[in-house]
Amino acid sequence: MANATHLRWKLEVPDPQEEALCAWLEGEGSSAFYREADPPRACFAYFPPDQAPPEAAGLAAFPGVRLLEAEAFGDEDWLAKSREGFGAFEVGTRFHVRPLWDETPGPADRLDLVVNPGLAFGTGGHETTRLCMELLEELADAGRLEGPILDIGAGTGILSLAAFLLGGRGLMAFDIDPDCGPAMAELMELNAHLLKGARPYDSFVGTLDHPKVQGPYAGLLANILLETIQDLLPRMAEVAAPGGWLVASGILAERTDEALVSLVSHGFKPEKVLKEGEWIAVLAVRVSA
């Protein structure tokens, strides 16, 4: 049998185009997409042997995106190629994140999170996830992680897991993507060494209007796109307890003012903004109605 040939695109992708490009590539049959954590932060898209790749001309719909390299490789190189660019790294002051194939534990004074980087989002490598984890550390230090807490658009559930490991309780996580259910289960399995039999959070597939969304919540997590945050802010304001906090990210730094105005107009007072690269995360508090 002939050796199956995989294809990998190496791409230059401006941050504002990342989400839309990822969605387009997935629709065109890409089996995985990720951005390197370290400069120059190139993006990679993979196409399986039985999937014809899209025409590169289609990238013209995404301003600033360039195809830097198209590389074909056989089955025997698949694991090595898919693992390139993923190394262990530290987040904030308490977390060490490593890919599942790296069996070297992190420093003893850090929580050693294991992730599957085969997933496009929610592995701790993106700036927005790291910023949210740093804000969760600050909330934990201030004794503000008492539940209940709702993780909106949770992806793999890494933020809910981080909040639990920092002492948060009463966590509920959800996403509209059915694939996130298995991804959350996998993340829990990969981190059984930290959980020691505990279930860190409950979860469901659905929206913010799901019957399981009870409220009022002492904390909300929303690492999603700014447009989605803006759409959901009226409902977030309904389910947030007075004085409850919101950690919001997935927001480009160039849209900071727009994000802050949106939060204030829906009853959330910004308390802190963290920035990394082209992204920000905001900690805000629900003011009394």
Image (cartoon, rainbow, N blue to C red):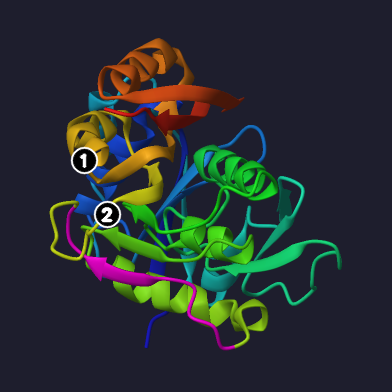
Q: In this view, does 207 lie to the left or right of 203?
A: left
Please tell me how crowded label 1 is: few (under 14), some (14-19), or many (20+) other residues with Cα within 10 Å.
some
Query: In the image, is residue 75 above or below residue 155?
Result: below
Disc 1 target residue: 238
Q: Is mark 2 on a helix, strand or loop?
A: loop
Residue at horizontal 17%, vertical 55%? 207
Query: In the image, is residue 23 above or below residue 287?
Result: below
Residue at horizontal 43%, vertical 66%? 170
Give the camera-side residue of 10 and 256.
256
Q: Which mark is residue 102?
A: none
**Residue type (three-letter) at the residue carrying disc 2:** Gly
Q: What stretch is highlighted in magenta?
A: 197-207
Q: Which mark is residue 215?
A: 2
**Residue type (three-letter) at the residue carrying disc 1:** Glu
Residue at horizontal 38%, vertical 35%? 18
Quadrant of the rendering where the C terminus is positioned: top left
**Position in image of residue 181 (x %, y %):** 31, 72
Q: In which quarter of the image is residue 258?
A: top left
Whether residue 144 is visible: yes
Please tell me how crowded label 2 is: few (under 14), some (14-19), or many (20+) other residues with Cα within 10 Å.
some
**Position in image of residue 109 (x %, y %):** 85, 62
Query: In the image, is residue 59 above or below residue 138?
Result: above
Give the camera-side residue of 226 and 168.
168
Query: In the image, is residue 217 above or below residue 272?
Result: below
**Position in image of residue 7 (x %, y %):** 40, 58
Whether residue 49 is visible: no
Give the camera-side residue of 175 and 14.
175
Main structural element of the magenta stretch: helix, strand or loop?
A: loop
Q: Are marks 2 and 1 in contact (CB under 8 Å)?
A: yes
Quadrant of the rendering where the N terminus is positioned: bottom left
What whole-number distance in Å separates the C-alpha atoms at marks 2 and 1? 8 Å
Q: Is mark 1 on a helix, strand or loop?
A: helix
